[in-house]
Amino acid sequence: MTVRDQPTQVAETIAARMAVYLGPHTARVAVKTFSQRALGRGPESLELPDVPELLAALRPMLRTLVGHSQCEIVLQRIQRELGL
Amino acid sequence: MSFKRLAVLPLLAGLVPALIVLSIEVARTRQIALRVEIETVKILGLTGSVIAALSFDRGEHLRRAWLLNGSCYGVLLLRDLLYGVWLVRDSGELSQYLEAGMVLVANAGAVTGVWMLSRTWKVAGIALPWSPLRREIVRWVGIVVGFAIAGPSLWFSIEHAMQGQVRAIVSAVSSAGDILTLALIVPVLLTTLALRGGLLSWPWGLMTASQFGWLIYDATGTIRLFMHVEPVTATMWSEIFRALACMYCFAAGIAQRAVSAPDAAAAPVAVPKPA
């Protein structure tokens, strides 16, 4: 991975919070997969304005694995940690 | 919640059938003690499934999966209750067919529940570890192991059922359900591996352990078909692995509930500071 491909701080923050549940590897892969799916680009270009769209894309995945209530808590926490 | 302690609890429960068999010499008393132990672990298996299901909202994929898994324990408990206090298996054909029907419903619930668990990764959209080829090879190994363990029992049961033995239908249905469930262990195991390092790896890992418990429980039955084992010894080993399977299901349910507790989301995380 080159320096240009490094995930941004925003991507790292989202992955770190999700890693509590999904483990570090799957959390990183999920951020990459869903940012490409929702925004058409990878975690190396994720910035704060992209967060609402990315979190909306991550919601069904998290809801399936941890349930609706817990999913919303996690997403709110991510937004708080990013200062949104 | 200490997940490690939760993982040890079923091992302690697995000792109970061994203690009963080794310490009680009177056959009738031993039989009663084992019956109490069997029903207790089944009730705990049902409890764990319901607790896990309640961690999810109505209509959610894993709520349905856990409820279907629990329905197997529920229907088998109802069967045990009916045939323990009211019906007698040899009381007539209707009674025997009712048992076959109940075992069919129980197995259908278990297989559908495990099938739903096995495809959760696909529903969620997470990636499984390993290459598709390696996953396919391991999946086929699971299917072959399932056939090797429950296949002989299914074969003999079908033979006996063809000769008109109604009780053999119960055994055949149960064995067919076991083969299908055992074939689905691999995707559940791979989901556990995908989630390693995260809190969710605990309920998934404990559920995988439960499925392995059932795998070895079935294997003990198959060994009985081909080897002479003292009935008491064979029963002891079967019941040890039944207890492990049910108790790991209970532990998985408790772990799922703990993961869904609001304070789980508050765990501190280390985010690298910007350069």
Image: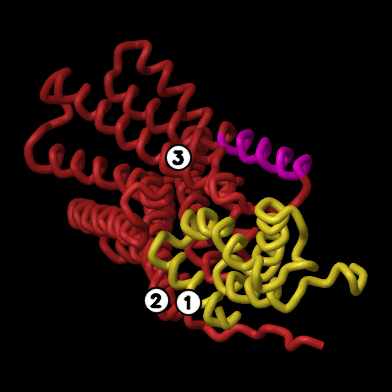
Please give the chain letter of the residue carrying mark 1.
B
Name the residue rendered at 43%, 73% in the picture: B6
> What is the quadrant of residue B93 in the picture?
top left
Please give the chain letter of the residue carrying mark 2.
B
Q: Is residue B15 visible?
A: no
Q: Amino acid at mark 3?
A: Gly
Q: Residue furthest right?
A: A2
Q: Secondary structure at mark 3?
A: helix
Q: Secondary structure at mark 1?
A: helix
* Magenta segment includes B137: yes
Which residues are the magenta region? Answer: B132-146
Please state the horizontal and vertical placement of residue A47, each as a whole percent of the image.
71, 72
Judging by colour alone, the chain drawn in yellow in this rendered image is: A
Dot 1 or dot 3: first in sequence order is 3
Please state the horizontal and vertical placement of residue B74, each as a whole percent of the image.
25, 46
The colour of chain B is red
User: Marks 1 and 2: same chain?
Assistant: yes
- Give whichever of A73, B151 is nearer the camera: A73
Residue matched to label 3: B221
In the image, residue B225 above or below residue B237: above
- Give whichever of A20, B157 is nearer the camera: A20
> What is the quadrant of residue B45 in the picture?
bottom left
Measured in 3D between alpha carbons, the distance from the residue under mark 1 to the one under mark 3, in whole angstroms, is 43 Å
Please give the chain letter of the residue carrying mark 3.
B
